[in-house]
Image (tube, rainbow, N blue to C red):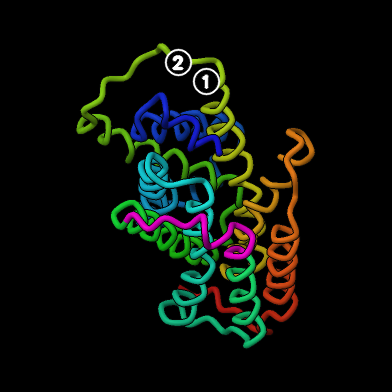
Amino acid sequence: MFTRLAVEEIAPTYLVVLRLFLASVLLGPIFIRMKDLALMKEQIPAILLLGIINAALPFFLYAYSAQELSAGMLSILNGTSPLFALIIAIIVFKQNTTIMQILGLGLGFTGLLVFIGVDKLSFIFFPVLLCLIGAFCYAYSNNILFKLNHIRSSALASVTMISGFFFSLPLILVEPKAFSWDISPEIIFAIFFLGLVSTGISFIAYVILLQRSSPVQASSIIFLVPVTGIFWGAIFLGEVISAKVLVGAFFILIGIALTNLFKPKVLSRDA
């Protein structure tokens, strides 16, 4: 929602750089210690890759696509990330899975479609393709983060954001639209919220969850993003919750439960 709001006043490139800068300023000084850097020395290529595919690139792809796609469509496309995570975990990283987990992801994605409504989908090929690439990046990076569980989650999240910030800086050089400080207070709030909360604090929580569970289990919570949005809207904005929304939310919750309750007994963290 905040991404969709912010790109109405500033270019996606500047939004990405600003949110990563804010997250880096918040996370770096607080969570990175010398002993963490010592552990990361042998994982520099993986951490640099995370900066690109877990921060700079997907943030830009989603922000750019938000100029043409609705929030509902963005949620649907973001919801493909758990499906990609499952495929990558099995094929690339040789992870075990269960039939119930596969069923759970299927139910979760079906619930997402019901929740948003098929009638709300708009297939504009290029921005849809960019979102799918972004979802694939998130899914692949989840598997990398899972392998790096020997590094403290808060430090790993912090370095990932800092790396992503530096990789995003060159995007400014190719941005044709000039940056303007004439931004409304609402957009300034949206940018700070995206940087400090959505990008910073919540990413640490997500990495903790990921390292304690699995890429498939952790990514399944993405299905909850539009659900929480709708219910916050009902609480604070008086929006009506329809029967379709309740049915979709039910499928999503059942799907997440199946994905997390019926996990494989053995998970490999070997690279």
Question: Which residue is found at the position 44% from the left and 74% from the top?
Answer: 88
Pointer 1 residue = 188
Secondary structure found at label 1: helix
Quarter of the N terminus within the rendering? top right
State the extent of the magenta-drawn residues as a range: 112-124
Position above or below: 166 against 133 = above
| Quadrant of the image occupied by residue 14 | top left
Question: Most extreme residue toward the top, as rendered?
Answer: 182
Q: Which residue is mark 2?
A: 183
Q: Residue farthest to the right?
A: 235
User: Disc count in the image?
Assistant: 2
Q: Position of residue 80 (x, y in %)?
A: 49, 65
Q: Amino acid at mark 2?
A: Ile
The residue tagged with tag 2: helix, strand or loop? loop
**Dominant SS in magenta:** helix
Residue 111 image offset from top left, x and y in percent: 64, 67
Residue 13 seen by the camera: yes
**Can residue 129 be found in the magenta stretch?**
no
Q: Earlier in the sequence, mark 1 or mark 2?
A: 2
Quick check: marks 1 and 2 in contact, CB under 8 Å? yes
Above or below, 35 against 248 in this view is above
Above-or-below relation of 212 to 186: below
Q: Which mark is residue 255?
A: none
Q: Residue 103: percent from the left, percent from the top?
A: 63, 82
Could you tell whether 263 is left or right of 17 in the image?
right
In the rendered image, is residue 42 in sight? no
What's the distance in space between the residues labelled 1 and 2, CA to CA? 7 Å
Which is nearer the eye, 120 or 224?
120
Residue type marked 1: Ile
Vertical placement of residue 125 versus 261, above or below:
above
Q: On the rendered image, what quadrant is the C terminus found in?
A: bottom left
